[in-house]
Image: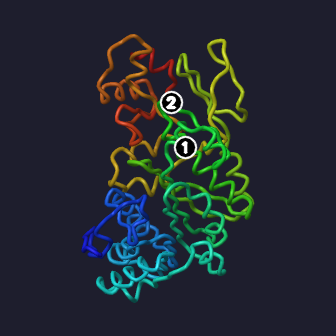
Amino acid sequence: MLKLFKEGNAEFYASEWQDESAKTPVFYNPVMKLNRDVAVWIVKQLKPKNICLGMEASGIRAVRMALEANASGITANDIGKEAFDAMKINIALNNVENSITASNKDIKSLLSEGKLYDYIDIDPFGTPVYYAENAIKSLADNGILAVTATDTSCLCGSYVKACLRKYSSKPLNNEFNKETGLRILIHSMQELGLKRGKALFPVFSHSSSHYMRAYLRCNASENALNAVKEGQGYILYCTKCLHRCVSDSPEGTCCFSQMEYAGPLWLGKLWDESLASSFELIPYIQEESKIAVPWHFDSHRLAKLAGKPALKHDMLIAGIQAKGFKASRTHFKPEGIKTDASVKDIISLL
């Protein structure tokens, strides 16, 4: 039985009873509204001409893009027959038939038909790795690949073997594990892109609720392919003094012992600064996008290490900035600080 919902500027029908484990016929997860909010915002900024939304269920993402971003040329696909039927109802309900074409195919089959898209959205349960190769094959030069990963416990280090199996990279379960997981997700997409001669650079990323999300722009030039490889590597981490550094190898010592490592992963920027400069849907991304380091710090852990009481964030950030470093809060965690200062610099300040 279908129920009428509202999100953004759209009204739409989805299954009244929602349960992920039961494979609801027309699934709608209100928790993922922010995911869709950001996707609509990205499309509004970048204005892609041909859009493929591969796992649409009710079609709400497609309808909102048409209504709120004035997008057209949208292929909204779902393999489920009931979802496909509901999608057609929702497209007509919102009067966006001229902007959206409904499709009822397996996503891999759809993405193997030879058409190139300027924006492809892969939003599955779990990992996007199984669908990404077909998506990358169908991605036009300068196009955007948008991927969601909901297997965050794997990417954040709770299940190391699973992460190695799915993403061919080792995670770290520490104070910046969400950022590390996001960088592992990006690296896995980049590796699949390199096999097809396509360099994928993140233009926007975020970690929210139970998922991670990355938007990657395609560039097929030889210089871009080389730049992707140059931007990959490892993060080394000392559990004793909290020192961390980038490396082209997983080997390193600190405090007279072997450092832990994460990687291989993407070490470069997570955001295009000009794009992030006008973004307001998630706090702190505007500020942290200007600081190009592949980690952040936990202010409480630093205070404990220094044997001092924790300072208020604004006071600590102001102190770091007064020493000539960049610093801001981060969306990755409430007690996090993004800065290019070292652990020693911050401990000295404390």
Label 1 sits on residue: 155
Q: Is residue 266 left or right of residue 152?
A: right
User: Residue 12, how many percent across, how many down?
Assistant: 29, 76
Q: Name the one closer to the observer, 29 or 350.
A: 29
Q: Is residue 72 placed above or below 129 in the rendered structure?
A: below
User: Residue 209, how many percent across, how many down?
Assistant: 38, 48
Real-space CA distance between mark 2 and mark 1, rounded to the nearest whole angstrom: 12 Å
User: Which residue corresponds to the image point at 30% horizontal and 66% vertical from the top-left?
Assistant: 17
Give the total number of marks visible in the rendering.
2
Mark 1: amino acid: Leu
Q: Secondary structure at mark 2?
A: loop
User: Residue 95, how many percent across, how many down?
Assistant: 31, 86
Label 2 sits on residue: 174
Comes first in the chain, label 2 or label 1: 1
> Which of the 4 quarters of the picture holds residue 326?
top left
User: Which residue corresponds to the image point at 62% horizontal and 76% vertical from the top-left?
Assistant: 109
Q: Is residue 104 left or right of residue 196?
A: left
Q: Is residue 176 placed above or below 211 in the rendered structure?
A: above
User: Residue 100, how many percent across, how many down?
Assistant: 43, 83
Q: Name the one closer to the observer, 348 or 118.
A: 118
Q: Is residue 250 placed above or below 116 in the rendered structure?
A: above
Q: Is residue 233 placed above or below 345 in the rendered structure?
A: below
Label 2 crowding class (10 Å Cα cut-off): few <14, some 14-19, many 20+?
some
Mark 2: amino acid: Asn
Label 1 crowding class (10 Å Cα cut-off): few <14, some 14-19, many 20+?
many
User: Which residue corresponds to the image point at 72% horizontal and 27% vertical from the top-left?
Assistant: 251
User: Which residue corresponds to the image point at 52% horizontal and 24% vertical from the top-left?
Assistant: 342
